[in-house]
Every structure is written in structure tokens, then in C-alpha cells.
Amino acid sequence: MIDIAKLDFDKGGGLLPAIVQHADNRAVLMLGYMNREALEETLRRGRVVFFSRSRNTLWEKGETSGNTLAVRDVSGDCDGDTLLVEAVPTGPTCHRETPTCFGDGAWPPAPGFAFLARLQRVIEDRIAQRPEGSYTSKLLAAGPRRMAQKVGEEGVEVALAATTGSDAELVSESADLLYHLTLTLKARGLGLEDVERELERRHAGAPAAR
């Protein structure tokens, strides 16, 4: 995830502030501090481990409450003296039983399409594991032509629902289309983020990438 050798622990007396961000909806969940050992333990366990300045010891977030933070990525800032930890919480993050330590505790604390990111991760896992009996595994085994066919079929279903169906039918068919489109993209090594970048490029009027 991160090259620890490039971090500047000396600047903060051996500690780096670690901002924890929800990996799906990008909400800022909390701020803690890590020394080198805490960061190494975070990477080893796959769960966020901080250094407690008051107790002068390591502590894993949620070690008593069960409200742990599963790590998805860790990166440093441009100066190497601050950490950004992308994680998925199990239960509320704050000790006040709110999802985040910031704001009024409303959920979701940030706008976005959180489940689409989660869906994409599930599809990535299916591609890697190919579990027996999985619909995704069956489509992958059938090959790109079948996946492309399903995208076309679902696109037609969306069009029909938009013209003659109910709102519920339109939403349902759109969900089918998004799933099959996401799978087709991931099978090609692409993702929804690539589509998002293209939309941003068009909005800005930038030339297409070559």
C-alpha cells in the first residue's frame, strides 16, 4: 500500500496524524495518530491501529467495542507527514455511537454512490475467486460476447421500461444494466471511475485521451 521509508516521522516527534476516510462514500470518519509500529500493525492486520498519546501505547480501533475499521488503502501526503487511511467501518466510528466523529452524526455523512463502489469490489472479488454457482462466475466463463449481449439486452429493457413501464420497473431494469455494465468494464480491467473521468473530461471540454 505505502512505502513507509518515504514517511517523515521525525517531524511530528515520531507520530503522524492519520485521517480515516470511508472507502465508499468518502466521508471523513475520524482523526488519530500513528507511529511507525502502529502503521506496520495496521498494514499487517488489515485493521486500523493507532498510537494512544494519553496511554502511550498502541490500540486497535474497536478492540473493545467491536467497531473496527477494515483498511482498504493507506497513502501519505506530498510531504510524507500525514496519512490518509481509506477504510470500511464495522458499526459507528465515534465513541458517541455516531457514524463519524464530525458533524451531527447524520448518515450518510457525505453524498455519493456508495453501494456502486461496494458492488464493484464484490465483482472484483468474484473475478479473482470465481466461486462455484455464482451468476457472475457463469457470465465470466461465458466470455466477453455473452457479457456484451447482456448489456445490450438490459439496455433495451431500460428503454422499454422508460417508455411503457412503471417507475419501479425503470429502476429495476436500470439496476440490472448497471450491474452488467460494471462487470463488463471490470472484465476489461476498467472500472466505473474510468467512466466518471470521461464524463468529467466531457464536462470540462477537454480533448479525449489517446
Image (tube, helix red, strand yellow):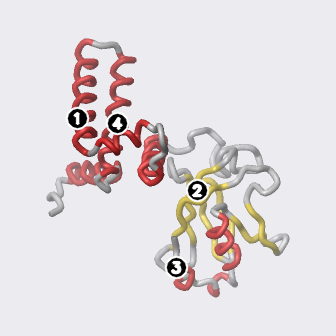
Q: Disc 1 and disc 3: Cα gap in Å?
A: 43 Å
Q: Residues within 10 Å of mark 1 (few under 14, many from 20)?
A: few
Cβ–Cβ under 8 Å for marks 1 and 2: no
Write down the quadrant of residue 177 in the picture.
top left
Q: Amino acid at mark 4?
A: Leu
**Label 3: how many residues lie within 10 Å, few (<14), some (14-19) or many (20+)?**
few
Q: Which residue is mark 3?
A: 3
Q: Quadrant of residue 36?
A: bottom right
Give the residue type at disc 1.
Gln
Q: Is residue 90 left or right of residue 3?
A: right
- Tag 1 residue: 149
Residue under label 4, please give it: 178
Q: Position of residue 178 (x, y in %)?
A: 34, 36
| Quadrant that contains the C terminus | bottom left
Cα–Cα gap, marks 1 and 2: 35 Å
Question: Marks 2 and 4, Cα distance to the nearest angstrom?
Answer: 24 Å
- Residue at label 2? 87
Residue 133: give x, y in percent of width and height: 47, 37
Which of the two discs, 2 and 4, labels the residue nearer the N terminus?
Answer: 2
Compute the Cα span from label 3 to label 2.
18 Å
Which of the two labelled residues, at mark 1 and mark 4, occupies the earlier sequence position? 1
Question: Which-is-in-front pick, marks 1 and 4?
Answer: 1
Q: For the residue labelled by badge 2, is the local secondary structure a helix, a strand or a loop?
A: strand
Ranked by sequence position, the earlier of labels 3 and 2 is: 3
Task: Classify residue 62 as left or right of residue 113.
Answer: right
Q: Residue at x 66, y 61 (%)?
A: 47
Amino acid type at mark 2: Ala
Question: Which type of secondary structure does the marked residue at label 1 adopt?
Answer: helix
Identify which residue is drawn at 30% across, 41% down.
Answer: 142
Amino acid type indicated by mark 3:
Asp
Residue at 62% x, 69% y is: 43
Assign a secondary structure to mark 3.
Answer: loop
